[in-house]
Image (spheres, rainbow, N blue to C red):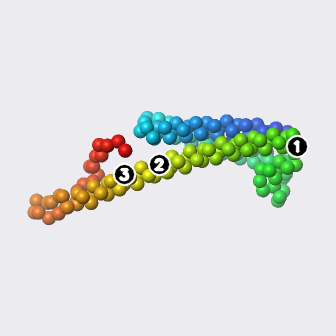
Amino acid sequence: MDKIFAAKKIEETLQEQIGVMKQVYEHQKILSYCVLNRSWDGVEQSVVKTTEASQAFFRLDKQCFLFLEQLKPYSSDAHSFYGYISVLPEPERKNLECLYRTLQHLMAISKIENDSLGTYVAHARSLVDGMVQAVEHHCKSSFYTARGTPSSANISRLVIDTVL
């Protein structure tokens, strides 16, 4: 395959990846908004759309790698994107570098969004676990059997009537 033709295919694939990554980021922002505002109706839909977009991105990533392999097949020195495109003329190489940097930027902000949501959920989960453990500990000595011996409370029926 001609190197210029491969470069055009890589460019098209990178542009598609950028579009998909923008979709992933938009779905992540919607998901974060839903979680932070306790709007549980949109959570499942956002997770499904994010997963679908992520799968499309990985499919495009494999496709891009196949095109990159056509630029420098069986090369041991082409370990990175920049190593692969180094064989291209400067105008094509500069264009691909710009697209690749844009893609890296979108991936970085998506990772930051994902990490911040994960941290928030982990903190909320530990807060609720701590509250349940405190209630469970407090309830252990509050319940007695008909014979007067202490019994443990059935925590599975605990209802927290508070917005966290």
Mark 3 and mark 1: span between their CA atoms? Answer: 57 Å
- Please indicate, yes or no, whether residue 140 appears anywhere in the rendered image: yes
Image: 149 above or below 163:
below
Q: Amino acid at mark 1?
A: Glu
Quadrant placement of the N terminus: top right
Residue assigned mark 3: 128
Q: Pick the residue in front: 9 or 158.
A: 158
Residue 26: horizontal and vertical position, in percent?
58, 36
Q: Amino acid at mark 2?
A: Tyr
Q: Determine whether label 3 and label 2 are within 8 Å by CB.
A: no
Mark 1 and mark 2: span between their CA atoms? Answer: 45 Å
Q: Quadrant of residue 25?
A: top right
- Please indicate, yes or no, whether residue 46 appears anywhere in the rendered image: no
Residue assigned mark 1: 90
Q: Which residue sits at x=30%, y=57%? A: 134
Pointer 2 local density, CA inside 10 Å: few below 14, some 14–19, many at least 20: some
Query: Which comes sooner in the sequence, label 3 or label 1?
Result: 1
Residue assigned mark 2: 120
